[in-house]
Image (cartoon, rainbow, N blue to C red):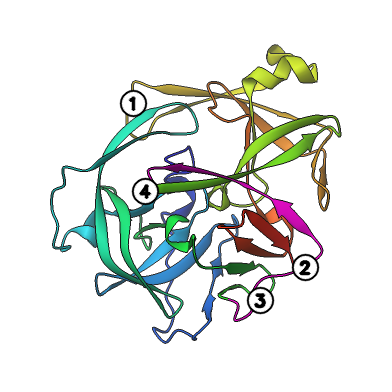
Amino acid sequence: MFNQSFIKKSILTASVFLYSSVVLAQKAPLNILPSGHLIVQAEVEGKNGNFIFDTGGGINLFLGNFHKNFPQKESYNFLTAFRATGEKMTVPIFKSKEVIFNGKKFKDIWYATHDMEIKGIDGLISLPMFYDTEFIIDYTTKEIIFPKEKLNGSKVLDIQLSTNADQSLDISTYILVNDIYKINVLLDSGAGNDSFWLSERLMGTLGIKKENLQLIEKKSEFDPSIVNKFYKGSISSVSNSFAKVEKPNVLFVEGLIYEGKTSINWLGKKLGFNLKEKKIYILD
């Protein structure tokens, strides 16, 4: 959690997501931005908001004025985590009494706060509260679905879970780079579409010279004294048993704490998640 896609300020500042407050029993509409970011609506502590649905967020996050009227203002509980670039973050954490999402009530869910405003966006909805709830992301119908029957299918992708005291939750999987090198990557819907980050440590393995790539330097949104370095290039392919992307643009990231990090859209158009059993079903 708290990786480089933690706040998508540059592409979301002008985005506003509004729709009817009537939510179908088992289906919730998705607003899919041109960037590929998924926007959903939820009710937190009786307050409606618009949120990035972020499988790489780690923990629910509520921004700026959205959390100002929550009953709990301070907490002695805290979470220490690292952004994808290695930047250390220590934040107070709280428990929401109730989150209503897609017609289902989720009780006692951990969340963090951050005093930043993004027009039309009230925060992130992340994976921990879905540990016991199967869900489907359908890019074609633009819906998140809670299936009535247990997920099943012949195309099954194994995933791994990373958690901190059951407060945060991230998912990863193994992929092949250039059909040869097997690496573990964080799966991050909050990165938008077609995002592929690889550790700078893999450049030597892949026979790529840093001096031949475009250097991009970005200051941290949280500590301007920290400058993160990205090297823009391309590789032959990324793939798994069911999907392959030829010649993707990639960013080699200095200090990346994962072997890699990717978006999820390239896995399939309809993805079913069973976190408890550590499975993603490729349904379309």
Residue under numbered circle 4: 167
Q: Badge 1: few (under 14), some or many (20 or more) residues near its Cα, within 10 Å? A: few
Mark pair 3, 4: CA separation: 31 Å
Q: Which amino acid does label 2 sit on?
A: Gly
Residue under numbered circle 3: 141
Kindly state the secondary structure of the residue where label 3 is placed. Answer: loop
Q: Indicate which label's residue lies in the foreground, 3 or 4.
A: 4
Specify which label sits upstream in the sequence, 3 or 4.
Answer: 3
Please give the label number shown on residue 224. 1
Are dots 3 and 4 in contact, CB under 8 Å? no
Q: Which quarter of the figure is the C terminus placed in?
A: bottom right
* Whether residue 58 is visible: no
Q: Badge 2: few (under 14), some or many (20 or more) residues near its Cα, within 10 Å? A: few
Mark pair 4, 1: CA separation: 28 Å
Specify which label sits upstream in the sequence, 4 or 1.
Answer: 4
Kindly state the secondary structure of the residue where label 1 is placed. Answer: loop
Kindly state the secondary structure of the residue where label 2 is placed. Answer: loop
Residue under numbered circle 2: 153
Q: Indicate which label's residue lies in the foreground, 4 or 1.
A: 4
Dividing the picture into quadrants, the one containing residue 88 is top left
Q: What residue type is labelled 1?
A: Pro
32 lies left or right of 20: right
